[in-house]
Amino acid sequence: MSESYAVDVESVTKSFGQLHALDGVTLKVRQGEIYGLLGPNGAGKTTLIRAILGLVAPGSGSVTVLGRRLPNLDVLRQVGYMTQQAALYPGLSVEENVKFFAAIYGTEGGVKEALEFVDLYDRRSSVVATISGGMKQRCSLACALVHRPKLLLLDEPTVGVDPQLRVQFWESFRRMAASGVTIIVSSHVMDEAERCQRLGLIQYGRLLAEGSPSEVRARAGTQNLEEAFLKLAGERQS
Amino acid sequence: MSGHRVAALTRRLLQGFRRDRRTVALLFVAPLVILGLLGYLMRNSSVPAVGIDNQDQGPVGAVVTSALESSPLISTTTISQADGDAKLKDGSLAAYIVFPIDFSQRAQSGVIAPQVHLEGSQPGSASPVLQALQQALASAASQAPGAVRFEPQVNYLYGGSSLDTLDYFGAAAIGLIVFFLVFVITIVSFLNERSQGTLERLMASPLRRGEIVLGYMVGFTLLALIQSAEVLVFCLAVLKVHNQGNVLLIFGIEALMAIVAVNLGIFLSMFARTEFQAVQFIPLVIVPQFLLSGILFPVASEPKVLQVLSDVLPLTYAVNALRDVMLKGADLTWTSLDIDIGVVAGVIVLLIVAGSATLRRRIA
């Protein structure tokens, strides 16, 4: 039953010309799970996330999100998305940006909470063009979760965020997951991978290995994830 | 000053262009398109059509008529005076000239007095008509004995000799300025939406494509309306551009034009990847419209091929409508005005649909 998964990607392929960005990916993420998508640059992480959002149409295969087969516009109401580069309006203040995204998802409340969540409430009147990269990233996260989504897709969310805040982010992610929010995080930072409940290793548009961080380590027979990843990626290549 | 560093900069610049084929193409194709268009327009435009009714019972009328017929400045047809005004109104004639019954008789006594009826709202066509007449009369004068006085009686159907160049162009400029500025602002800011990644975010939200296009349209239209009002007030109150029509009607046509510009901007932004490329649409979109919309050259005098183009450009209809209102005092009871406004409104609907459709699709 696909309903038991928050995200159910079934043998999805997607090509851009000669490039096979997704080459038969099957991915099942349970509700309330924090799932990490790992892989080198250009492995297909972002394309997979965009396929889950319905932003790219799969060449073949199917994507089911929160029990509904894509394409489906309504389901996006319950999905939050944070892009790799902060997607914000530079001419608006932090608060105006968050309010705008709240409004297009039809929820006016939650703006203050979201700003406090990313520790930007005191800087809410700053114009986005004038704040640092890390703050933009945090503002972007606030925009992604202001409507309290049931599924949160984070494309490298902690790039440019300082370690202290990163720890804070992850505590909050865990809290959200405990309350039933499903989170999919793409990353190539191994330290972040450790914090996920389950990992999927992506390379050449395929899912190479899957499992909890300790399972992945055990499978590769290495001490840390970084080595495990390099080993598993290397095996497939040869 | 280091030659190497300067060379590095120059090289980098050219390398960038090498990958941007479209910019290069535009850089070299656009001048040819624009100049070609201008050249074709000027060399092949037909001369103003002039109707002649020679009622003269003497020989002089015939002499002047044949001189007019051979003039390269105008093309002549024989008409009857009774049909003259109707032909001016429907645009088939730019002017008609009547030689009255006593034309020769008065010429004998030294007074040459033809009746000239000009349409009056087309700035480009009056002067060749008067010039051709002047030359033709000079040939007649050589036939008449003694000193002669030229006393042409000139009538204007619309406007009149009191109108100056600004009065003719002001009406059209109101439409053009709003169209141009609103188009540029829209295309650039919609492109920003794309390049700063927020369009991707909007696409991942429950927003529908039509909602995005409409939201943009309303926002920019509000700005454009304020601008339109400003332009109008400045033209009428400060520049004192001649106006015979209803100011609200002018504002309405201007507003429609602004909405066309907004939607054209949204639609064309889909075909540009950078602001740089967007700016390149200006010579391609704005200049031909400027040349072909009848602002400078009457559409009726354009070569037939270009007339077809003029007929599909929305600015042509807007310029025509604005001139009708401001110079001829047209109101909504005029069918020609209703048609012009209807065409512009139709273009808006078409562009909204096209804009929504080309906004990059979600899963098909």
Image: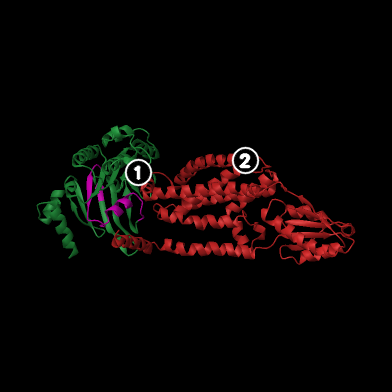
Chain colours: A green, B red
Chain at tag 1: A
Left or right of A11 in this view: B129: right
Circle 2: residue type: Leu
Q: Secondary structure at mark 1?
A: loop
Give the residue number, with chain letter if any, for mark 2: B236
Q: Identify the magenta region.
A: A28-57
Q: Are the numbered discs 1 and 2 placed on the same chain, yes or no?
A: no
Q: What is the residue that sits farthest to the bottom in this orientation? A: B70
Q: Quadrant of residue B206?
A: top left
User: Is A214 in front, or is B336?
Assistant: B336
Disc assigned to residue A88: 1
Q: Report x, y in % for residue A67.
A: 32, 46
Tell me where residue B325 appears, x and y as whole percent.
66, 45
Give the quarter of the image for residue A113: top left
On-image quarter of the N terminus of chain B: bottom left
Q: What element does badge 2 sit on?
A: helix
- Mark 1–mark 2 contact, CB under 8 Å? no
Residue B281 is marked as none
Question: For the C terminus of chain B, which image quadrant?
Answer: bottom left
Q: Residue at x 11, y 53 (%)?
A: A218
Q: Is residue A210 magenta?
A: no
Q: Label 2 is found on which chain of the structure?
A: B
> Distance from label 1 to label 2 (Cα)?
42 Å
* Residue B76 coordinates in the image, percent (x, y): 76, 63
- Residue drawn at x 32%, y 40% as measured from the top left: A130
